[in-house]
Amino acid sequence: TQRIFRVAIDGPAGAGKSSTAKLQVASLLSFTYIDSGAFYRCVALNSLRWHPELFEDGNARHVSLEAPDTRRIIAKVAESTVVKQETERALPGSSAAKGTAPLMPRHRIWLGDDDVSVAIRDNAISRIGSDVAKLIEVREAVGKMQRAAATNVGSRSSGGIVMDGRDIGTHVFPDAELKVFITCPAEVRARRRLLELQKLSGGTGNTESRTTTKLPTYDQVLEGIKQRDVQDTTRAVSPLRKAEDALEVDTSDRTLSQIAHHIADIARQRMNRLN
Ligand code: CDP
Ligand code: CDP
């Protein structure tokens, strides 16, 4: 089988991983993008669909994993979850070859025969996804799905994959051909997040803009980000950390496009050396 080139992109929440990976690196290299968090979200959605009794305390936003029975059930759900991902090709002629930002390609997620691209972004699913991602049994099952997704791509003769997440360079592909660790000070991430929230609450016409609550202050957003950093880096299973051999990229004062080109250039140099 043909060897594929794997780009692993990890980093804390809000550093710019998904916009960097999705938007550009994959399309610059003509690689396949794989969203690693989507697998956890699909396990969460199946848990809710197949075992509503686990959420019977009326709290569909959370699953308590204290009971060994619940752990076993969720582990089974994870093992039976079948996910497919596909990026719709960006229009030719709009590409970054011209130095302009390419159109954001649409990335679809399938759970069995169901297109769940929108359903898995639900807040309840985010919450449950982050609950189930703590279970070692789930991480192992999802790790298998993530590796299988990369292997499938390889057999369809694409040159490589770009996968973003928290533990791709450390656990999923410890031997990835290129590992990138995206960083950015919490203060910068807080400012970006606040800007995003402001845009969402000011927008009209989409469901996300139906915010009736008051916007948080900068200090509240910053505090939230710092808490999540602590959670991500100190959790027992697969904590977020930079792989020793990962290239560190700070996204503070560069545009997404500059960062994507930088990562793609390094990937090309390495590919040339391997060939
Ligand atoms: O995927 P991750 O949680 O790491 O972050 P993201 O959703 O890709 O990026 C968080 C926000 O920062 C988005 O609104 C990006 O557009 C923004 N961003 C930016 O403005 N400039 C960068 N160089 C990187 C990200
Ligand atoms: O964008 P956001 O960080 O909210 O979520 P995501 O990347 O879609 O991931 C969904 C959930 O899976 C999050 O709670 C992540 O912590 C978890 N996850 C993980 O544990 N390991 C990964 N490689 C990717 C996601």
Image: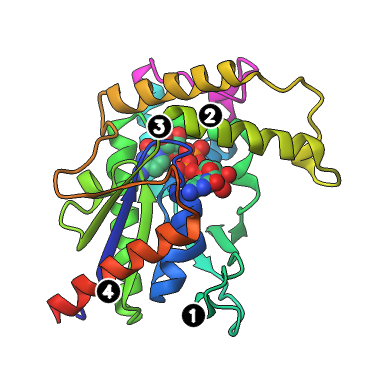
Q: Which mark is residue 268?
A: 4
Residue most extreme to the front: 253
What residue did someone put label 2 on?
190
> Could you tell me how far apart the alpha carbons at marks 4 and 2 are, in whole angstroms?
33 Å
Q: Residue 96, position in %: x, y?
A: 51, 75
Q: Is residue 13 magenta?
A: no
Query: Splitting the image into 4 quarters, where does residue 197 fall?
Result: top right
> In the visual, does 134 lie left or right of 111?
left
Q: Dot 2, crowdedness within 10 Å: few (<14), some or many (≥20)?
A: many
Q: Quadrant of the C terminus?
A: bottom left
Pair 4/3: label in front: 3
Residue drawn at the location 57% of the way across and 61% of the way down: 108
Residue at x-position 62% and y-position 25%: 60
Residue identifier under label 1: 97
Q: Nearer the viewer, residue 23 or 98?
A: 98
| Mark 1 or 3, nearer chain start | 1
- Label 2 is placed on what type of residue? Ala
